Image (spheres, rainbow, N blue to C red):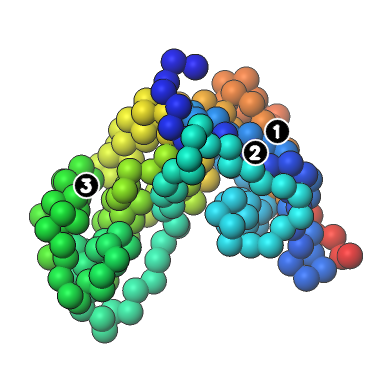
Amino acid sequence: MNNPTRGPIVTCSNLSMNFGKNRVLDGIDFIANPGELHCIIGPNGGGKSTFIKAILGQMHHDGKIVLDWPSAPGKIGYVPQNIEVDKTVPLTVENFIALCVQDQPAFFGVSKKIKTEIDRILARVNMQSKKKLLFSELSGGERQRVLFAQALIPSPDLLILDEPMNSIDRTGAAIFSELIGELKAQGVTVIWVHHDLAQVREMADQVTCINREIIFHGVPSEVMDEKHLLEIFTAQPVREAL
């Protein structure tokens, strides 16, 4: 691998999880390497988002998850599918990002250093002109650009995206793709839950299909054939009563 190493090797060993009596993940073995884009695909309800929450440490699980950093633990960026904001709260785009990245409350003001960084990253996602607008009044695609921007402050060493492009437009999709390419070149580990199979084929270094268990894994051009894709769209998530 020619890329520098910034991100961790993410390893899951026999990762399993139950919701009550239902088995939602079963025996997942998974590795994501720095400088690579690893896409997670699979049917709705198959456990993709649950898998991501386990990696983020948000859900109890069986098995082991190890983040093997090249030196000291680095920064983790996360972009969710969407976020709900109370429309009665007058929270601007600039203040929303400040809430996520600075120590002092946003109503005390945005520090000069953070303001400069927010301007830089909003310009990068083509949203700087809307930094004074209310976050709640943005379109779905614009919100996703802002969520992506906040995940990049500070610059992450591990970036996890949970289907952030469901409501994004072509311009936003192009921005996402360009930025992810830059992060890969910097040695960042990128894990992306994705539904656009054509883009997965085009961009991903590795792909893993999850439907409670791993259906297939490998280089997209080698494993995303007609047989495997039929498995994605015809298989139903299995629910076991324990």
- Asked if one can make out residue 187 in the rendered structure from this viewpoint, the answer is yes
Identify the residue under disc 2. Answer: 11
Identify the residue under disc 3. Answer: 121
Sequence-first disc among 1 and 3:
3
Q: Nearer the viewer's eye, disc 1 or disc 3?
A: 3
Q: Nearer the viewer's eye, disc 1 or disc 2?
A: 2
Kindly check if marks 1 and 2 are in contact, taking CB atoms under 8 A apart as contact: no
Q: Which of 87 and 35 is in front in this view?
A: 35
Mark 1 nearby-residue class (10 Å; few <14, some 14–19, many ≥20): some
Tell whether 61 sits left or right of 162: right
Tell whether 104 sits left or right of 225: left
The answer to whether residue 100 is above or below residue 117 is below
Secondary element under disc 1, as helix, strand or loop, is strand
Mark 3 nearby-residue class (10 Å; few <14, some 14–19, many ≥20): some
Secondary element under disc 2, as helix, strand or loop, is strand
Identify the residue under disc 1. Answer: 216
Q: Residue at x 74, y 41 (%)?
A: 13
Q: Residue at x 19, y 56 (%)?
A: 114
Question: What's the CA distance linking mark 1 and mark 2?
Answer: 17 Å
Q: Which amino acid does label 3 sit on?
A: Ile
Q: What residue type is labelled 2?
A: Thr
